[in-house]
Image (cartoon, helix red, strand yellow):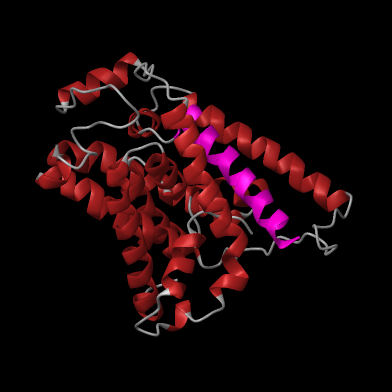
């Protein structure tokens, strides 16, 4: 039973990684193209994903769809009054995203595609996460 | 709630040698499904980028190619520029900045902002969360600064 649960997430993850590569959103070049506003490519993919997401969330809410364990699916709201963390933290993330040309999902998909050097930014990202955890109380949120 | 970068926190929680409070939680209970998903993503990357890889270079906008050539990027084959992202590049100052600092900022920034592209731009915007819109605006502030101000200096 537990094995089936794992398999389900493994398969969804596999589809996710496969699509990240095939849609080329893992590409440093595509990220540069996006930040230079030279193509609709990235905007089309993210935009369409959000449209599908909005429709899906609405369907889930309207029909009170339950998760696999029978619990109602609820999405915890994020606290928008913490605008500093979203703008400052988001900007730091954006600097890294444009520099490396990959956000967390693509880092791992690229590693799988044979670009083994991606283990370096993955380890750095873990280090960055850890340093955030250490400094968290002294940062503006 | 789904987000890839949450897994980076789970890894920190799994090896929280410094006993940092932010990482004191049951990472197996909270993250087993997400970590399994992440393992799948590596597998999917292997299938899409190695087993069934596309040998053609990416069909980029001509203006992007011109701009990047002006910055000194010459190799447009593959998914990422070997000039910046390769074991050879790791030995150059620019490659070191891209791989080490880039990764660090992604990890730090994602947790600071409470999510990455999948958590905020996809999941958060899908739920029409104002906080996620602010985070995405932040992503673009940083991305545009890097693209137009910092990259021209370091390349």
Q: Is residue A5 magenta?
A: yes
**On screen, residue B6 above or below A97:** below
Residue A135, image x and y in percent? 34, 76
Front in this rendered view, residue A71 or B68: A71
Residue A3 falls left or right of residue A66: left
Residue A9 falls left or right of residue B136: right
Give me the residue at 27% from left, 45% from top: A117
Q: How many marks?
A: 0
Give me the residue at 45% from left, 73% from top: B14
> What range is drawn magenta here?
A1-25
Residue B105, image x and y in percent? 32, 56
Q: Quadrant of the N terminus of chain B?
A: bottom right
Q: Quadrant of the C terminus of chain B?
A: top left
Dominant SS type (magenta): helix
* Res. B89 visible in picture: yes
When asked about the image quadrant of residue B131, the answer is: bottom right
Give me the residue at 45% from left, 33% from top: A25
Residue B6, image x and y in percent? 51, 61
């Amino acid at each position: 039973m537990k094995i089936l649960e794992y398999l389900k997430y493994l398969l969804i993850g596999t589809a996710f990684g496969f699509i990240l590569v095939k849609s080329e959103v893992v590409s440093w070049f595509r990220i540069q193209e996006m930040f230079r506003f030279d193509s609709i490519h990235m905007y089309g993919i993210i935009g369409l994903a959000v449209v599908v997401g909005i429709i899906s969330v609405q369907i889930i809410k309207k029909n009170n769809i339950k998760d696999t364990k029978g619990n109602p699916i609820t999405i915890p709201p994020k606290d928008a009054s913490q605008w500093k963390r979203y703008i400052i933290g988001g900007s730091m993330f954006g600097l890294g995203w444009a520099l490396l040309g990959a956000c967390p999902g693509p880092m791992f998909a690229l590693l799988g595609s044979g670009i083994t050097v991606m283990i370096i930014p993955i380890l750095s990202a873990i280090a960055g996460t850890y340093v955030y955890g250490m400094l968290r109380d002294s940062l503006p949120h | 709630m789904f987000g890839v970068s949450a897994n980076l926190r789970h890894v920190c929680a799994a090896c929280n040698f410094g006993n940092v409070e932010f990482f004191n939680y049951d990472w197996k209970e909270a993250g087993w499904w997400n970590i399994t998903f992440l393992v799948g993503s590596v597998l999917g990357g292997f299938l899409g980028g190695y087993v069934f890889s596309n040998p053609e270079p990416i069909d980029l906008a001509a203006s992007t190619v011109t701009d990047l050539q002006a910055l000194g990027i010459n190799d447009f084959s593959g998914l990422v520029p070997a000039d910046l992202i390769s074991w050879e590049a790791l030995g150059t100052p620019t490659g070191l900045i891209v791989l080490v600092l880039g990764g660090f900022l992604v990890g730090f920034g994602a947790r600071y902002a409470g999510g990455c592209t999948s958590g905020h731009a996809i999941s958060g915007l899908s739920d029409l969360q104002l906080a996620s819109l602010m985070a995405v605006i932040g992503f673009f502030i940083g991305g545009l600064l890097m693209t137009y101000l910092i990259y021209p200096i370091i390349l």
